[in-house]
Image (cartoon, rainbow, N blue to C red):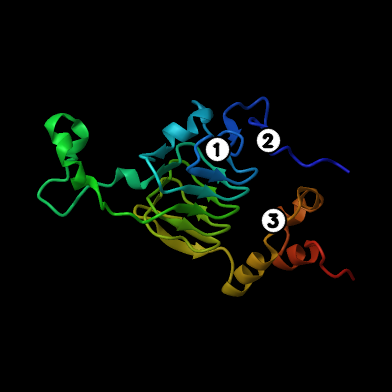
Amino acid sequence: MPLPADPTVLHPMPDQPRVVLLKPLVKSPLIEVGEYSYYDDPDDATAFETRNVLYHYGPEKLVIGRFCALGTGVRFIMNGANHRMDGPSTFPFPTMGGSWAEHFDLLTGLPNRGDTVVGNDVWFGYGSTVMPGVRIGHGAIIGSGAVVTADVPDYGIVGGNPARLIRTRYSDEDVARLLAVAWWDWPAEHITRHVRTIMSGSVADLEAAAPGAPTT
């Protein structure tokens, strides 16, 4: 039987160094990425942690599921980007040092939406941006240049600035069926046997291919 792709290889396409698998790349304990999720960038895809995850001072995490596709320039803005907005100035004086550092308490209690969480099988278009604390559902599509400021439902397609829901890829009933099947959790060998169904089959085909599904 043909072997599945190796999720531990940094460059899954040896002749395309612009593509990296994120799970073997990221080192930060504040970033969790599932197997096979990848980032594509012709400049330096290996700089993902510093160039694409911004203002990540913690403790909030960035969590990305399995089988996600991240186009060039996708960026995650983390909670560290927030400034005070309850006074006349938003300038972070204490961070500049000197005697201003004595007022560091003014930077506590900033707006915090928690972890940024991306489901499985999410496709991010070129140059899209995700704001702090957003939750993106399984099977969603984020349009090129979108600025995602609010949660995205499972199998939703969003675009624009701020991103708006354009449509959902399936009916509510079919979304529930797809979530129940959760093909991204199948063993890699089983996925290998059913790649064509996963990519181009119907919901019913996918249910029939699931491990333990009754045979006819």
* Tally of numbered discs: 3
Residue depicted at x 59% and y 67%: 170
**Looking at numbered disc 2 in the image, what kind of residue is underneath it?**
Thr
Above or below for 76 versus 168: above
Q: With 211 as the anchor, is 139 left or right in this view?
A: left
Quarter of the image where one finds residue 20 = top right
Taking depth in this image into account, of 128 and 8 the one nearest to the observer is 8
Residue pointed to by mark 3: 185
Residue pointed to by mark 1: 39
Query: How far across and down, in percent of the image, does residue 135 sit?
Result: 46, 57
Q: With 29 as the anchor, is 131 left or right in this view?
A: left
Tell me the quarter of the image containing the C terminus.
Answer: bottom right
Query: How far across and down, in percent of the image, does residue 52 sit?
Result: 44, 37
Foreground tag (1 vs 3): 3
Residue pointed to by mark 2: 8
Residue depicted at x 63% and y 65%: 179
Residue furthest to the front in view is 102
**Looking at numbered disc 3 in the image, what kind of residue is underneath it?**
Asp
Tell me the quarter of the image containing the N terminus.
Answer: top right
Q: CA distance from mark 1 to mark 2?
A: 14 Å
Q: CA distance from mark 3 to mark 2?
A: 17 Å
Regarding mark 1 in the picture, which secondary structure is present there? strand
Foreground tag (1 vs 2): 2
**N-term-proximal mark, 1 vs 2:** 2
